Image (cartoon, helix red, strand yellow):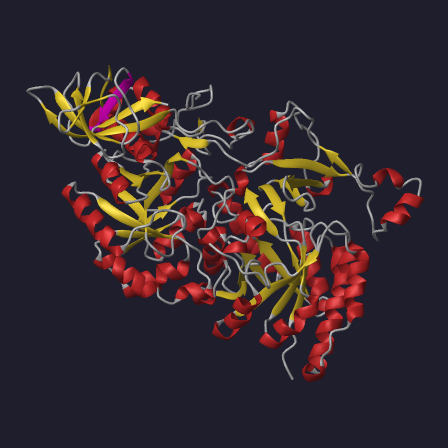
Amino acid sequence: MCKKPELLVPAGSLEEISAYLEAGANAVLIGNVEYAMRLPGDFSIEDIREAVAYGRQHNAKIYVSISKLFHNEQLEELKTYILHLADAGVDGIQFGDPAVLRLVKEIAPQLPLHWNAEMTSTNYSTANYWGDRGASRVVLARELNMDEITEMKPSLRIESEVQVHGMTNIYHSKRRLVKSYMTHQGRPVSGSDLSSKRGLFLIEAERPNEKYPIYEDENGTHIMSSDDLCILEDLHVLLAAGLDSFKIETLMKPMSYNKTVIQAYRQAIDTYIENPEDYEFNEAWMDEIRRVQDPERELSFGFFYKEQVY
Amino acid sequence: MQTTTKTHVHKYSGRRNRLSKPELLAPAGNLEKLKFAIHYGADAVYIGGQKYGLRSNADNFSFEEMREGVEFAKQYGAKVFVATNIYAHNEDLEGIEEYLRNLYNAGISAIIVADPIIVETAQKAVPGLEVHLSTQQSTVNWQAVQFWKEEGLPRVVLGRETSMEEIEEIKRHVDVEIEAFIHGAMCSSYSGRCVLSNHFTDRDSNRGGCCQSCRWKYDLFEDARPEAETWISEEEALSDPVLQKFQLGVNQLPQFTEDDNAFTMGSKDLCMIEHVPDLIDVGVDSFKIEGRMKSIHYVATVVNVYRQAIDSYMADPDNYVLKPEWIEEINKAANRPLNTGFFYDTPDHEDHIYEPEEKAAPYDFAGLVMEYDSKTGMATVQQRNHFKPGQEVEFFGPGGTFFKQTVETIWDEEGNELDAARHPLQRVKFKVNQPVAYFDMMRKKK
């Protein structure tokens, strides 16, 4: 019998946590906007405590993202924040900036660390490097292909997490690019909403059918993929490879959509684990997702079956 | 071409960390550019090898060329660094050790590395080779810098998002060499945090495939469809009077008009020539110029100017004056409008290029001085671009020697008079108004 992987989803509120756990997730990623990027909602430290308590009751892990690239001015408060998280008893911290690793090791070494350097966690050896320095998990880059991911697993000395569904970030700048553009046009944006709720997107001239969401927040400008990753049909390949955690990205999707997706993946995982040899993909799981999928966003395999050149 | 900074003049007013002479670090896309960069005043150059670098399109160095470059650099007391700054995939791991050994054996002083596994491999396998952390790691705070110092790295190249004040703080907290980009093109994203190329063209930006999608033109829209829990089909929408107006064509609201420029992420280029004293005062140890793909003319001109500014400030900090001709020189080589990046504030609408991109630099490299006869005042010049009698040209050389003149009669080496210097690398002779020396350059307006 093979090991049951974790099904992880970012949640934006306590309500979402409860809905997603009910739908079949067993780990949740949350965070505070001061310290994390691209999360579906904002949790105060009190909310985080409540989430941890709720997670305990429901046998689910509560991870906190501290994924920002920090500047000096935030280092002091970051320290306090980490102490609060340790006190709250969170199950792990996702980080990209080595400053976080250094501080956690100094003041809260009991906190498990998940290394998430977004598009730059691209090989097993670098993951093990961070493992040697205290990380217990690597979040793999979304730009890897299936062979790279499955080959990597036996060489990893730490847990691996891979995104299996949803949009991905493809560009992050500290600059306020939308605000700059609008100001350049003579339409200043003071007071107007440039957040992910606004629904802004970019279209490149030669790719009229690809809509790339773009938004701004405290961390600058984020551009997201025009397609939604959906590995459901080939989830068994990742299950067979023994990856430890599957992440469904919930960002910029309605809660009802996310619940449907979580349920579909939950069924696929459970069916596989019950009897890997006789596993058969059930097209009905995909149909459920297709039914709620935004028709203007393609469901794709992302980079799983692409050859990239350089 | 506009002046180099915004109208308001900034001056870093904090404490002076110490006054030690920074290294001037220049790009060298090939052996010839390496020689020019060093002759014009670079203390060190960085180059790309055949593997593991981020400029897969550049004319990268073989080990043999590296050895020759290192030999040349030695005569000037200069160093050669190699950028091995990809984020490796599994398939890239094998062979790194051997490659790094070859670099060391070729006399390379340091490698510039983004991926921590290359850092570790170098430290274990080739302890004599210095490792510098690449800007691709987007290191922008002192705790992160401290981390890399504790990992044994003598130098960190900061992310371009770091301000002057932050550099001062970093230097105050951590005793490590700090390298900062001071001139050239910039990623508008956090370096390494952009996979636009991967998505648009299947080219891996973090392994050298960047196709500069940030400089493409985009249209910005707002999604105007009603919030949907379940998406409905086109027919359903058409039959619903309320939803009809959200059908194709009206379901997205353009955030621009016919006359507007398109949206882009493309940044103006960095230029810190007006702020050399600030950079030295806060303790930047290495001034890095971007541009392994740039021309000889660009590299020589830019290096020459910063060399003079640094030397002038170090010689007498209190009486230092920014020379207007330095800015003029920089503008002769500039490919894009210039700004000061994140050093004094976060770039805004004035710092991106929405207008159609300006043409390349306004001057061409016309000829290279090979010999000069002080008795006759005749120079032997190797042709690098077409020029002819009657044209106005400028001569310049290391240290700021500079004069303009009109080209008079040109002869070939056999003494035949020429109507123009037409052939690339052809050696021609003509009279020059002031003494020149081997390696001086001649430019002309385009």
Q: Nearer the viewer, residue B160 or B387?
A: B387
- Inspect the magenta stretch and tell me whether residue B396 lies in it: yes
Q: Nearer the viewer, residue B227 or A85?
A: B227
Q: Nearer the viewer, residue B169 or A274?
A: A274
Q: Residue at x 75, y 62 (%)?
A: A261
Q: How many marks?
A: 0
- Relative to B144, is B102 on the left or the right? left
Q: Which residue is situated farthest in the front direction here?
A: B416
Predominant SS along the magenta part? strand
| Magenta span | B391-398
Q: Is residue B212 visible?
A: yes
Find residue A55 and report its horizontal and vertical position in percent. 70, 65
Q: Is residue B133 above or below residue A158?
A: above
- The quarter of the image holding the N terminus of chain A is bottom right
Find residue B409 and report its horizontal and vertical position in percent. 20, 17
Q: Quadrant of residue B168?
A: top left
Q: Quadrant of residue B331?
A: top left
Q: Residue at x 35, y 66 (%)?
A: B95
- Inspect the magenta stretch and tell me whether residue A244 lies in it: no
Find residue A132 and report its horizontal and vertical position in percent. 43, 67
Q: Is residue A170 above or below residue B405?
A: below
Q: Is residue B85 above or below residue B32?
A: below
Q: Is residue A19 visible?
A: no
Find residue B423 and report its horizontal and vertical position in percent. 27, 32
- Relative to B440, is A189 on the left or the right? right
- Relative to B252, is B396 on the left or the right? left
Q: Residue at x 57, y 46 (%)?
A: A171
